[in-house]
Image: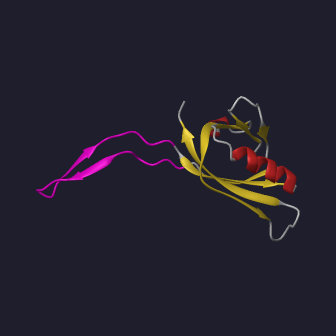
Amino acid sequence: MSVTITAQDGTGDSFSPAVVTGYARPSESGNVVHELIDGSIAVTLVGDRPAAGTVGMAFGSDIDAEAAREMLRRPTTFALLDEERPALNMTFIRYGQLGVAIHDAVRHVWTFDVGYQEILT
């Protein structure tokens, strides 16, 4: 994946991980099932909620990984752009944890997972 993540805080700051190690884009249904007194159900149909998940990234140096981590800690929205798969493009906020680690087997690769919540614009 050729991915760029850009802060949308007016700075123009962005980064591209060496590799995207994992990416999931699940969305949850907004439908509601109501259990009625007589044992039957009624349903309220609602569209899916925006996607929320985790993106895993790898960097060739701790400096690159730390710069990306610091950018993602800003209180702003971010744009994820994938040149090869435009359907994956999204605007998101960081949601949940942001963990950074050095790869166990390859000690010169830094990885992190970032939790996100897609924002519909």
Q: Which residues are magenta?
A: 26-50
Residue 3: within the magenta?
no
Instruction: State the count of labels.
Output: 0
Give me the residue at 60% from left, 40% from top: 92
Q: Residue furthest front?
A: 75
Give me the residue at 53% from left, 34% from top: 120
Q: How is the image coloured?
A: secondary structure
Left or right: 117 in relation to 39: right
- Picture quarter with the N terminus: top right
**Residue 108: quadrant of the picture:** bottom right
Q: 48 above or below 99? A: above
Give me the residue at 70% from left, 46% from top: 72
Image x and y of residue 113, in percent: 68, 56
Closer to the camera in the image, 77 or 80: 77
Q: Residue furthest bottom?
A: 105
Left or right: 83 in relation to 34: right
Give me the residue at 50% from left, 41% from top: 50
The kind of secondary structure the magenta stretch mainly shows is: loop
Image x and y of residue 44, in percent: 28, 43
Image x and y of residue 74, in percent: 68, 43
Image x and y of residue 75, in percent: 63, 41
- Picture quarter with the C terminus: top right
